[in-house]
Structure formats: C-alpha cells, structure tokens
Image (spheres, helix red, strand yellow):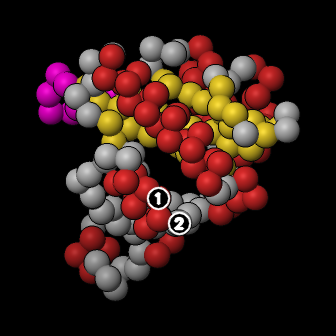
Amino acid sequence: MISRKPIESDRGPFLSLAGAFLAESTFDASKMSAEKVLRLFDMAVNQEDLIYGRVFESGGEIVGYYCLMITDRWWSDETYAADLGFYIQPEHRGRKAGVIYRKVVTDSVMWAFLRGCEEVVLGASVGIDDERVIRWYEKIGFNGRSISVRKTKSAWTAEQFPNMAKG
C-alpha cells in the first residue's frame, strides 16, 4: 500500500469510499451528498494550501483516503487544522496500513505547522474502532482527549424536552 496526492481520476473511488465509510460508521449513509463529497475531493486536489489530501492505493486500487483542513478559530485569529475524514477499507487495515498512515499523519502535521497552524486536531468519533484509533493517536504523540456526544433528530422526542416542544 502507498499513499499519494489525489488526482482527478480518483474521483469515483473517493466517492465510493465515502459511501463505504458512512455505511460502516454511526452516521446515516442515506444522507450522503455526492456533490459535497466531490467538492471536498476537488479542494483536496486543487487547494493544497487549505487541504492536505491523500489517497491510499493498493494493487492499483484506491482503498482509502485522509483529508486535513486548515480553518480559523471562531474566537481568535489563530488557525488550526482538523481532519475531515480518514477511511481505509476493512480488508486493507492492519500493521502495514498503520505504518503508512503514521507517515501521512506526521507529514500532515508538519504541513499544518508550516502554514502557521497552532494545533492539529484528529478525531475518532464515528464508531469505527474509536478507542483503538485514540490509543494509536496517543502513541504517536497526540494528547488531550476530548469527548463528543450526539443526539440525532430521529432520536429526539418531545417528552425528553417538554419546554422545547411548546415553542
């Protein structure tokens, strides 16, 4: 397996992998917007100053992707970088993928710091081996665990929030 910058011909596989990611994660795959996924892909290909994008290739097939984006803090002039997505097909995960992913993460952190970012934030909150991913990130020097919780609209009931239901 290798990692490389995405090119225009990776468009279709990137879109398919986004669907596979959503199907495996805790997100609702039926809400995927192909237009938005491909907009991110185009940014990864054409806006290297804003997005660090990589695809993972094995045997000539795209089997994964990683995207890190620079953005501003809402409360200051500082910038930071956060991952927008990372996915490798289950059959391609393992030790070899971990070695390659470590280099991609290390390179992306350097890329972000060289562009003035104060921090790089990587998440593990999609329901795909989250605890293992967090331990791996900690092993390569990330710290400061944060926890995110979600409540989907479909899980919301008026009985749980009676004051909101009244208007």
Looking at the rendering, which quadrant does residue 163 occupy?
Answer: bottom left
In this picture, is 13 found above or below 93? above
Pick the front one: 100 or 50:
100
Do residues under tags 1 and 2 come within 8 Å of each other at their CB atoms? yes
Q: Which mark is residue 110?
A: none
Under mark 1, the amino acid is: Val
**Element under disc 1:** helix
The residue beneath circle 1 is 133
- Residue 83 appears left or right of 116: right
**Element under disc 2:** loop
Looking at the rendering, which quadrant does residue 6 occupy?
Answer: top right
Residue 93: x and y in percent read: 66, 55
Pick the front one: 135 or 49:
135
Tell me which segment is drawn in magenta: 70-78
- Residue 4 appears left or right of 102: right
> Residue drawn 65% across and 26% down?
4
Pick the front one: 162 or 56:
56
The residue beneath circle 2 is 129
Residue 18: x and y in percent read: 67, 46
